[in-house]
């Protein structure tokens, strides 16, 4: 990984933007990465059909946490329809990295829960995917690889 991008990802991982919970929220959603069991949740406050506040919470690897932080800054201010239309290209553009299929699941978790809160995940490409059993050792290895 390019050193500059590594620094960018690590910065968002260590100093995540818009992480926490909202006492007052209109919608919320939580999901997990089926490959490792890591969970990410989101609280969203709406102003009409526009996201006025958003907070992610949960745990996961550097890519999942950093990506949630990075996209949170873009999601605030967007309309529900605009967020519903986003796909993996948005995430890849925002983080500036192509991700392996395994790592893509980590990177897409933030967008998945945001769309889940606003419009549901029925149309999500892996929405019907069953969680797989991963040993704690395998999950730890997955988390540690950035
Ligand atoms: Fe669990 Fe990335 S979210 S390893």
Image: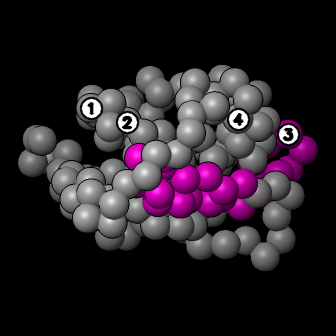
Of callouts 3 and 1, which one flags the residue occurring earlier in the amino acid sequence?
3
Q: Nearer the viewer, residue 57 or 24?
A: 57
Mark 1, residue position: 100
Of callouts 2 and 4, which one flags the residue occurring earlier in the amino acid sequence?
2
Disc 2 Cβ-to-ligand 1 distance below 8 Å = no
User: From the image, which quarter does the N terminus lie in?
Assistant: top left
Q: Is residue 140 left or right of residue 94?
A: left
Q: Image point 47% across, 57% down: which residue? A: 37
How many C-alpha atoms fall within 10 Å of the one at disc 2: few (<14), some, or many (≥20)?
some
Measured in 3D between alpha carbons, the distance from the residue under mark 2 to the one under mark 4, in whole angstroms, is 17 Å
Question: Picture coordinates of residue 40 (x, y %)?
Answer: 55, 59
Which of discs 3 and 1 lies nearer the camera? The answer is 1
Q: Is residue 96 left or right of residue 83?
A: left
Say if residue 82 shows up in the picture.
Answer: no
Q: Which mark is residue 121?
A: 4
The quadrant where residue 21 appears: bottom right
Question: Picture coordinates of residue 105 (x, y %)?
Answer: 42, 39
Mark 2, residue position: 104
- Which region of the structure is painted magenta? 29-54
Mark 3, residue position: 49
User: Circle 3 sits in a helix, a strand or a loop, which is it?
Assistant: loop
How many C-alpha atoms fall within 10 Å of the one at disc 4: few (<14), some, or many (≥20)?
some
Question: Picture coordinates of residue 13 (x, y %)?
Answer: 34, 63
Give the colour scheme of this rendering: one colour
Of callouts 3 and 4, which one flags the residue occurring earlier in the amino acid sequence?
3
User: Circle 2 sits in a helix, a strand or a loop, which is it?
Assistant: helix
């Amino acid at each position: 990984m390019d050193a500059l991008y590594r620094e960018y990802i690590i910065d968002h991982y260590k100093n995540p933007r818009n992480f926490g919970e909202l006492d007052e929220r209109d919608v919320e959603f939580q999901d997990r990465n089926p490959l490792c069991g890591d969970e990410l949740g989101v609280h969203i406050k709406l102003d009409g059909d526009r996201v006025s506040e958003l907070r992610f919470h949960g745990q996961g690897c550097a890519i999942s946490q950093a990506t949630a932080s990075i996209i949170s800054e873009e999601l605030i201010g967007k309309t529900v329809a605009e967020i519903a239309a986003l796909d993996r290209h948005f995430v890849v553009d925002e983080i500036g990295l192509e991700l392996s299929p395994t790592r893509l699941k980590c990177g897409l978790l933030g967008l998945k829960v945001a769309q889940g809160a606003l419009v549901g995940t029925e149309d999500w490409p892996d929405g019907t995917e069953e969680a797989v059993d991963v040993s704690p050792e395998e999950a730890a290895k997955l988390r540690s690889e950035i």
